[in-house]
Image: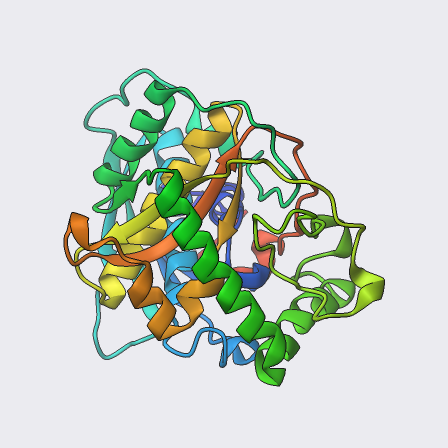
Amino acid sequence: MLTSGLDAVTLERLVSAAVAAPSMHNSQPWRFRYRPETTTLEVRLVPQPGLRVTDPTGRGLHLSVGAAVFNLRLAIRQLGREPVVRLLPRSPEPDLLAAVRVAGPVRSAEESGPDLYRALWHRHSSRLPFSDTPIPGEVLGELAEAARAEGAVLELPGELEIHRLLAATAEAERRGTAEPGRRSESRRAVDRASDGPYGIPAEALGPQDAEGRLPVRDFGALDPAEHQPPVPFEARPRVAVFCTAQDEPADWLRAGQALEHVLLLATAHGLRASLVSQALEWPDLRWAMRDPRHGPGHVQMLVRLGYGPEGAPTPRAPAADVLERGPDTRT
């Protein structure tokens, strides 16, 4: 055992839960450093040269790390311990985005509800068509409350607003496929999957929408050999919008935790989800996507929700590859 009370197997279990989080183009931009003297896992950002055009500010990567932090919190509570999170704990270390201390016994039991820890191991994006079965209002209300608990707002726009958001997404997709740098980065996300362990395998890519209602990201970068035949998607997509009041790195990390909380709760309710981020990668389109009727919030992510096929998962790096242990770690 470690002097901290955590053994190496437990550490790997915690990190395995963290890396099950979604990340931009499945880049998995994180490393974990264990500090046994404080029983703390540091979550560090690994720069991604392959996303310099698509994510120049690192906003998308911060969301990814925030999602991993939420999973780490869940896994610590599963041990019966209390996770104590500090975001951006040391300004001289810009790669250190969060420190999660494994504290004493949990102070309060979670309210009864879906098992999010179990959902953590089953959640993944589905880029396939969903059915037109409506999502119950009480489930949507639970999702909105989950985002609020993490310091974000989950807006559930009506049909006309969804049409406007998807039109902006379609414009972003047109721009992206016409710009060589962005096309190259999307293409690289698929190519990296063949080298392992990151990237998006071809079987996880969905077809294009035959009706053109839903702009699906072209990860194949206009390579016809990568495309499945277009098929009809749902007639009325349900899109949820994540917003924060401010737009600083800490807000991005909170939005990532809210995103993962909502995705896991949706999974526990039998919903599928895919992330719709193309328009958020263009400053002008991202600004235009906010709904001024709800205040000057900053849109952080769009998520398409619905009932449908599971889709194929994307690979994850083994915990041992992203975990740095302290000198006194023993199995």
Name the image colouring: rainbow
Q: Residue 44 falls in which quadrant of the image?
A: bottom left
The reply, left or right, for residue 233 in relation to residue 170 is right
In the rendered image, the residue lying farthest to the left is 295
Q: Residue 5 falls in which quadrant of the image?
A: top left
User: Residue 76 appears at what percent x and percent y?
Assistant: 37, 38
Q: Name above or below for residue 118 compared with residue 188.
A: above
Of residue 75 and residue 201, the one placed in the foreground of this image is 201
Of residue 118 and residue 102, the one placed in the foreground of this image is 118
User: Residue 245 appears at what percent x and percent y?
Assistant: 17, 56
- In the rendered image, is residue 28 in sight? no
Of residue 300 and residue 85, the one placed in the foreground of this image is 300
- In the rendered image, is residue 176 in sight? yes
Identity of the residue drawn at 55% across and 66% down: 173
Identity of the residue drawn at 61% across and 34% down: 130
Viewport quadrant of the N terminus: top left
Q: How many numbered discs?
A: 0
The reply, left or right, for residue 287 in relation to residue 232 is left
The reply, left or right, for residue 124 in relation to residue 108 is right
User: Residue 91 appears at what percent x and percent y?
Assistant: 21, 75
